[in-house]
Image: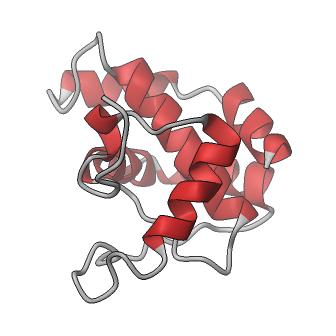
Amino acid sequence: MADYYARLDAWDFSIIKAHAVRKGLFSAAEVDDVCREYKRFMALSCAYKSSAVPVSKKVDEFWHIHIIFTEDYMAMCRKVAGGFLHHRPGILDEDVEGQSFDSNLSLYQASFGAPDSKWWSDVWTGAAA
């Protein structure tokens, strides 16, 4: 887990963050925070490939921005995960929600502490304020 996060943390997300701010999806004050949460989500996704790691709506918006920068996204996937990280919409469907999310909350907490409710309240109701 730490190795995945270290590789993500070393990646230059400046163009992605600038685009997110320019499009008005995130403010300049919050874009670093959402980028941090995106890196955490991606690290969990890499480390626990067999689990359905949930993504919040806000983190998913940042992911969508990164995906449209196809060359950068593909290069990051290769460098961090050794292959492409596919986006699978619909992971927040009600029939799936709650089944594996609680165990994934434990994985998040073990690696990063309590999730910030600003970014994760739509996924984990116990996210810290």
Q: How many marks?
A: 0
Relative to the observer, which residue lies in front, 60 or 64? Answer: 60
**Residue lying furthest top:** 29
Q: Is residue 111 above or below residue 102?
A: above
Q: Is residue 125 above or below residue 16?
A: below
Q: Is residue 93 above or below residue 36?
A: below
In the picture, measured across the screen, residue 65 lies left or right of residue 45, that is left
Q: Residue at x 74, y 61 (%)?
A: 47
Relative to the observer, which residue lies in front, 66 or 111? Answer: 111
Residue 116 x/y as whole percent = 38, 33
In the picture, measured across the screen, residue 111 lies left or right of residue 129, that is right
User: On the image, which quarter does residue 54 sit in?
Assistant: bottom left
Residue 102 x/y as whole percent = 47, 67
Residue 44 x/y as whole percent = 64, 56
Relative to the observer, which residue lies in front, 74 or 53? Answer: 53
Q: Residue at x 43, y 20 (%)?
A: 32
In the rendered image, the quadrant that contains the C terminus is: top left
Q: Residue at x 60, y 67 (%)?
A: 85
Using the rendered image of the protein, determine whether residue 85 is visible from the camera's viewpoint.
yes
User: On the image, which quarter does residue 82 sit in?
Assistant: bottom right
Using the rendered image of the protein, determine whether residue 16 is visible from the camera's viewpoint.
no
Q: Residue at x 59, y 35 (%)?
A: 113
